[in-house]
């Protein structure tokens, strides 16, 4: 180590001392190797040496590390929390990469090359070349039924997936249908059962044969897994209780969309409600194109954070 | 007694091939001997009891012959549906697990070891069917109800968590879970241990009935000779890891040959 490097390393916590995109190149290479392995074995959870990040676990450290190891100066980065670009978490992660990488950021799905997300896949269909990066809290879909890691690993290795159906079975005996709405398990490439992180099951079909690359990072659990472009992704179900996505009777109050994932918004103390697209960029885009919903122009056009969340997470 | 037991069974041509064959099975834990040089054959529809005092090696032997514990020496062959008599420990782990899942059952002494305590009674019973690849909720639900009915569990509690059940009820759920997938051989380690006497008697009755009607082979470990007499066609008596006597249950219990068996039997009579 040269004198100069030593001094620089001791110089203080200023961001100028960090490598491009925060992580050092050695770490990035290690993470890229894990990503390549994950792409080679779709749906398989690859262990990796998760690093300490300047945000706590639960804030998307797995996703941030994936993004940091992939992003380059020519990328355009989008980050969403729930479906919105303007929530605290999404804003700070976007600022983080603007600061440590100087990369361009955007709220427009169509302009982004890398999209980091926790709860949603954008409504606008993804295209070849785009990368979705998911922040995953619990990568193991079998975990809350089988606590032993050695056992869940064996189950994946030997394709013993009966247990995964136990949860669906319980859902039906309790609710008369598969009530779980988020973190709904999928079979990837006819081989590995995978948790698609807490995205609503509404988004599950978007993974199937997607032209984009989908990467999943769990920081605390130290796992990376992937759905490569054009991969078969099937949501689990029973013959007599097949997988179904949520539907809404209402249209988006702001843009009139019928086919999107909706959040319910309380409008006033009298308990008046409206439904709005959870994907705020998509909704804004439609409004810009002249689409109008029954509540168009409502002052709540700006809100995105007060949405009521009533998802039952399966993971 | 044995005449009655025989009459209860449907006429069954003597099966000429064993379903399980143990040859010189030895298990050592370091310097401690778990069991040593145990050989026997078991035929379809047969119930074999393994008796002996605490520490005599019953559980060790049961774990070895069920493929759960690799023996230090000797081999254990099971007549798999696919390949016939096959050494369980020559199979890949994946194949061994498949055989255990699809063709065997294992009832633990403590139902907590054999049940998923975070999953409803019904789902516990249905899981082995899902493991076999059944993906039809309605048909699995029906089978679950049939089996919970057979083990006399109140069907109103089918969706309750076993945590809230009595030990006897938990054990009946475990038994249903280990029979629902029509295994050909079931291992039981002290299935009625830890239960009070009246619950135990009813459970034994039930087990006997289930075994007789389904013609499956059973190996049951117990240190309770009354349990052995009620369930087993044949007995193996173990002492210090060795089999010291074997024979038809009534013969062994009524006319024990080995000094240790005589002691064991007389000890029971004194109680
Ligand atoms: N995991 C182990 N490690 C070391 N020694 C063991 C282990 N398991 C069993 N043993 C020893 O092996 C011998 C046989 O034990 P085993 O549990 O098979 O007896 P058992 O007949 O089932 O007894 P019990 O009636 O008390 O259940 C005993 O000496 C026991 O201490
Ligand atoms: Mg024992
Ligand atoms: Zn909208």
Image (cartoon, rainbow, N blue to C red):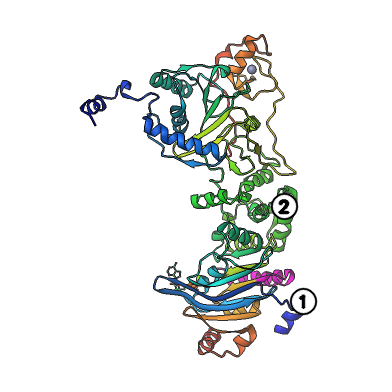
Figure check: A297 above or below B201: above
- Callout 2 environment at 10 Å: few (<14), some (14 to 19), or many (20+)? many
Q: Which residues are magenta?
A: B193-217
Q: Is residue A268 left or right of residue A245?
A: left
The main secondary structure of the magenta stretch is: helix
* The residue carrying mark 2 has its beta carbon less than 8 Å from ligand 2: no
Assign ligand 3 to one image quadrant. top right
Name the residue carrying label 1: B12
At numbered mark 2, what does the secondary structure look like: helix, strand or loop? helix
Q: CA distance from mark 2 to mark 1?
A: 30 Å
Figure check: B122 above or below B238: above
Q: Are marks 2 and 1 in contact (CB under 8 Å)?
A: no
* Residue A109 position within the rendered picture, expressed as x and y whole percent measured from the top left: 57, 19
Name the residue carrying label 2: B140
* Residue A241 position within the rendered picture, expressed as x and y whole percent measured from the top left: 72, 42
* Residue B83 position within the rendered picture, expressed as x and y whole percent measured from the top left: 67, 65
* Residue A223 position within the rendered picture, expressed as x and y whole percent measured from the top left: 48, 39
Which is more toward the observer, A286 or A43? Answer: A43
Figure check: A129 above or below B115: above
Mark number for residue A63?
A: none
Q: Residue at x 57, y 39 (%)?
A: A42
Residue A14 seen in render: yes
Does the magenta run of residues contain B232?
no
């Amino acid at each position: 180590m040269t004198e100069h490097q030593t001094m620089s390393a001791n110089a203080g916590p200023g961001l100028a001392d960090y490598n491009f995109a925060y992580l050092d190149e050695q770490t990035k290479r290690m993470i890229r190797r894990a990503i390549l392995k994950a792409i080679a074995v779709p749906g398989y959870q690859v262990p990796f040496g998760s690093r300490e990040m300047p945000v706590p676990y639960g804030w998307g450290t797995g996703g941030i590390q994936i993004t940091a190891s992939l992003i380059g100066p020519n990328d355009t980065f989008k980050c969403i929390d729930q479906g919105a670009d303007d929530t605290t978490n999404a804003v700070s992660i976007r600022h983080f990469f603007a600061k440590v990488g100087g990369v361009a950021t955007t709220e427009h799905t169509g302009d982004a090359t890398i999209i980091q997300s926790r709860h949603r896949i954008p409504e606008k269909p993804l295209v070849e070349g785009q990368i979705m990066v998911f922040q995953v809290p619990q990568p193991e879909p079998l975990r809350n039924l089988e606590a032993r890691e050695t056992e869940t690993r064996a189950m994946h290795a030997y394709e013993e997936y009966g247990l995964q159906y136990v949860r669906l079975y319980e859902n039906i005996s309790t609710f008369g249908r598969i009530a779980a709405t988020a973190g709904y398990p999928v079979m990837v490439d006819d081989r590995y059962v995978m948790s698609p992180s807490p995205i609503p099951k509404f988004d599950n079909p978007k993974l199937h044969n997607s032209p984009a690359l989908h990467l999943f990072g769990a920081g605390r659990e130290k796992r990376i897994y992937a759905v490569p472009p054009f991969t078969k992704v099937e949501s689990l179900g029973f013959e007599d209780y097949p997988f179904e996505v949520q539907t809404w009777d209402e249209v988006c109050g702001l843009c009139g969309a019928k086919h999107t994932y909706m959040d319910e918004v309380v409008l006033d103390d009298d308990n008046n409600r409206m439904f709005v697209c959870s994907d705020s960029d998509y909704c804004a885009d439609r409004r810009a194109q002249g689409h109008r919903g029954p509540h168009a122009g409502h002052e709540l056009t700006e809100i995105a954070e007060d949405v009521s969340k009533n998802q039952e997470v399966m993971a | 007694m044995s005449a009655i037991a025989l009459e209860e069974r449907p006429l069954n041509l003597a099966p000429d091939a064993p379903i399980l064959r143990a040859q010189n099975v030895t298990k050592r834990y370091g310097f401690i001997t778990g069991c040593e040089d145990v050989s026997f054959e078991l035929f379809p529809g047969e119930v074999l009891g393994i008796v002996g005092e605490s520490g005599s090696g019953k559980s060790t032997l049961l774990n070895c012959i069920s493929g759960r514990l690799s023996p230090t020496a000797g081999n254990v062959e099971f007549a798999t549906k696919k390949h016939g008599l096959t050494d369980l420990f020559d199979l890949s782990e994946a194949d061994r697990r498949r055989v255990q899942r699809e063709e065997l059952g294992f009832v633990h002494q403590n139902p907590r070891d054999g049940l998923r305590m975070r999953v409803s009674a019904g789902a516990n019973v249905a899981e082995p069917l899902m493991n076999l690849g059944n993906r039809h909720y309605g048909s699995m639900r029906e089978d679950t109800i049939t089996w919970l009915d057979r083990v006399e569990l109140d069907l109103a509690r089918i969706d309750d968590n076993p945590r809230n059940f009595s030990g006897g009820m938990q054990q009946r759920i475990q038994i249903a879970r280990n029979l629902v997938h029509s295994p050909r051989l079931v291992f039981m380690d002290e299935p009625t241990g830890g239960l009070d006497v009246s619950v135990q008697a009813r459970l034994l009755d039930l087990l006997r009935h289930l075994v007789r009607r389904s013609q499956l082979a059973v190996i049951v470990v117990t240190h309770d000779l009354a349990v052995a007499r009620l369930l087993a066609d044949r007995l193996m008596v173990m002492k210090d890891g060795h089999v010291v006597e074997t024979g038809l249950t009534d013969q062994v219990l009524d006319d024990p040959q080995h000094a240790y068996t005589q002691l064991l039997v007389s000890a029971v009579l004194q109680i």
